[in-house]
Amino acid sequence: MKLLEDRAKAWLRARALQVPEGRVATTPGEAGAIARDLGGRVAIKALVAAGRRGKAGAVRLAEGGEAAEAAAQAILGMELAGQRAERVYVEAAVEIAAELYVSFGFGRLAPQVVVSRRGGVDIEAVAESDPGGLIAADIDPLRGLRVWEAADLWDRAGAESALIPQLAALTARLYEAFQAADALMLEVNPIAVTHDGKLSVVGAMMEIDDNALFRHAAWRDLGLDDAGPGGRPLNERERAVVAADRKFPGGAIRYTELPGDIGLFVSGGGAGLLQHDLVLAAGGRPANHSDLSPATVDKPAALFDAIFANPGARGMLVGMNYLQLLPCVLIIEALLVSLRRSKVDPRGFPIVVRVFGPKEDEARALAASVPGLRYLPHGASLEEAVREIVAAVKTIRP
Amino acid sequence: MSILIDRDTRVVVQGATGSQARFDIRYCLDYGTRIVAGVTPGRGGESVEGVPVFNTVRAAVAATGANASAVYVPARGVKEAVLEAVDAGIRVLACFAENVPRHDAAAAVAAARAAGARIVGFNTNGIISPGRSKLGGIGGDRAGEIYAPGRIGVCSRSGGMSAEICWMLSRGGLGASTCVSMGGDPIVGMRMVEVLEMFETDPETDACIIFGEPGGTHELEVAEALRAGQLKKPIVALIAGQFQENYPAGVSFGHFAAVIRGENDTASAKRRLLAAAGARIAGSLEEIPELVR
C-alpha cells in the first residue's frame, strides 16, 4: 500500500525528523486558509500516487492566500497518471541551496539504502547517465544502519564534508522510520539543504507492507488495492473476490479478469502460471487468472462464483496441481455450492476437472452427482487437461 | 546421501498443536520422518500423534537432540520462532507460513545465516528426500506415489510444481535425491543457486531440474553460476509465466515474488539466459524425463 506525501510526512514528523510544516486541502478556499496560516511562500502539490508531478504542473509555489487559492484551483481536478487530483498538500516552502537523494528498499535478502548527491531529479535518469553517482549498500536488519556507516556512504557519494555529520544522522534515523513503519520503500527526493546549511525532508514517498498491517491499525482501513491489470479499476467480480478473501479466515484467493473465454480455476502459484501458458499455447484464451492457497470451502466457492459471473467465460478448467495439503473433496464441495447458487449447468458450460490428491475418492463420488462434469482419470497430465478444455470451449464458441 | 534432510534428521515441529501441523505430523510419521518433539508455548507436557510437546525449542532440543525444525507458526510469529530455533542450535528450518512481513523475513534470514543455519521458505510446502525423510506437507498422504527415490535434484519456486515434476519423473522411471520447494515469498532463506550448489557436491545427485517463474533473480544467478563453471551437473529448466508478458509490468498473477519489474525478469528472458549458459529448457512437463535422462 502506497502512502501519499501527507501520510508519509506525518509519519516522519511524528518521529522528530526535519519535515516542513504542511496540511491537506480539498478546496481552493482551504488551501488559501492554510497558506495564510503558514505565512510566507508555500508549495502546493497534488496528492496522487504519480511521479514527475512537477513537470506536469501539479506542484506550484505561491505567496499569500489568494495566490495559493489560484494554484490550488489549477491543480484540483487535474488528471495525473490516470488519477484525478482531489486533494492538495500545502506546505511551507523551503529555500533550497542544494538537493540530495536517499531511498530505502529491499534487495535479495536484506534491506538496502541508496544515496546520491544528485537529488531533486529523476533518479532513474541519474542511474543511466551517471551510475557512479548512486551509492548503494545492504543493511544488516539485526543491527540497523549505524551513523558512521551512513557517513561512509555520503563520503563515497561525494557529499560536501561539512554536511556529512548531519546527513549521516538523518539517514540513520530515516532507516529507523522505514523499519518502524514496516515500509517496503521510503524515498526522500529531495533532501533539501537550505542557505544556512540545514537539512529538510522536502519530498517523501512510502510504500507499506500489507502483510504487516496488523502492527499498524491506523493504516489498515485506508482502502482497497485498486489496481487491476494496466492500472484499470477492479470490476465487480474482482472486488467481490477481494472482499471474500478478507472476510473468510485462512488461505487466500486471487482473481484477475482477462478478455478471453476460458475460466481458469488454477492454483499453486507456479502451477497456475504454467497452465495459463499451456492454454495460450493450445490456442485457448483465458477469461481470467486465479490463485488459491489452502482454505475452507468459502474462499474457493467465492472464486468459482466470480468465474461463473464473468459474462465472457464459456467454460472452465479446474486445474489444480497434485494436491498435497488440501483435500480434493473440498474443491468439489465448493464447486457444487457455487454451481447451485450461480445456476450454472455443466452440460452447457464445459467444466474440466483435474484434481488429484488426498480424499480423491470422495471427490469423485461427489462430482459424479453432477451431470456433465468432466473429471479426468487419475494420472492425466496438466497438458491433457488443458487440451481437453480448449477443445470443449471451441465447440460451443458462437 | 541427499541434501538438507536424511534418515537421521531429528525434527522438532514448532506450532505443533495447530490443525495443519497435526495433519502433517501424522503423514510425516507414516512416511518415516523422525519427528522427535513438538513445541507450543503453554502446552508443554501434552503430546501430538504420540510426539511429546515442549514449551520451548531449547527444552525440546535438550530432551530429544532435534537438529531440524518444521515451523508451522503463523506469519506474524515466524521471526521470533526462527530466532528461537537458531539460538537453540537448529541448523535446518522449513518455514511454511506465507506473506511473512518483509522486515521480519529479512531479520530471520540474517540471524540464520549468521549462525550457519539454512532456512527453506518462507511459503514452502516442504523438503523431501524420497524414501528417507520429509519435512512438511509435501506429498500429502501420497508422498510415495508422487516422489520416487532417484538421482535427480529438484528445486522449485512452486510447491505444486515440485509435485507435478516429481510425479512426471516417477512415471518416467526416474526419481529425486531431494526435492526442495524454495517458497514463494519475495525473501526466501536459500537462493536457488545455493540449493544447486548443495546438489553439486552431493554424490547421489547426477542432474538437476529447476522450476522458475517471472520476477526476481533466482534463475539469473543460476545462469551466472553455470556460465562461470561453478555448477557442472546438467540442469533442466522449466520456466512458467510467459503469458504475463502480454500484460503491463507490475501486475501480480500468483506468487508475490513473480511480479515482472525489469527486462530480465520475464519468463522468456530467463529461458534465453539459462539456455545460453548451457541449461536445457523444457517447454512442458511432458518433455522433462527425456531431457534429464
Image (tube, coloured by chain):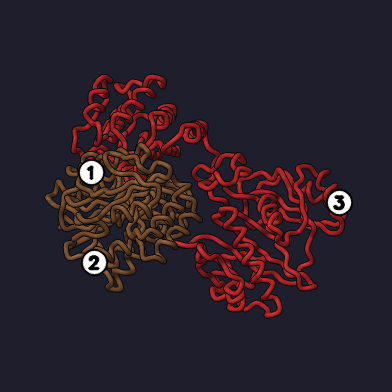
Chain colours: A red, B brown
Q: Tell me the mark number nearer the camera, choosing from 3 and 1.
A: 1
Q: Position of residue B94 (x, y in %)?
A: 34, 52
Of A147 and A79, the residue lying toward us: A147
Dot 2: chain letter: B
In this figure, which residue is indicated by the disc labeled 1?
B29
Residue at coordinates 71% horizontally, 59% vertically from top-left? A16
Which image quarter: residue B117?
bottom left
Q: Quadrant of the C terminus of chain B?
A: bottom left
In this figure, which residue is indicated by the disc labeled 2?
B200
Q: From this viewpoint, is residue B157 visible? A: no
Dot 2: what SS? helix
Dot 3: what SS? helix
Q: Position of residue A360 (x, y in %)?
A: 23, 31
Badge 3 amino acid: Asp
Q: Position of residue A115 (x, y in %)?
A: 59, 69
In this figure, which residue is indicated by the disc labeled 3?
A37
Dot 3: chain letter: A
Badge 2 amino acid: Glu
Badge 1 amino acid: Leu
Residue at coordinates 76% horizontally, 59% vertically from top-left? A20
Q: Quadrant of the N terminus of chain B?
A: bottom left
In whole angstroms, how far apart are the C-alphas of marks 3 and 2? 69 Å
Which image quarter: residue B53?
top left
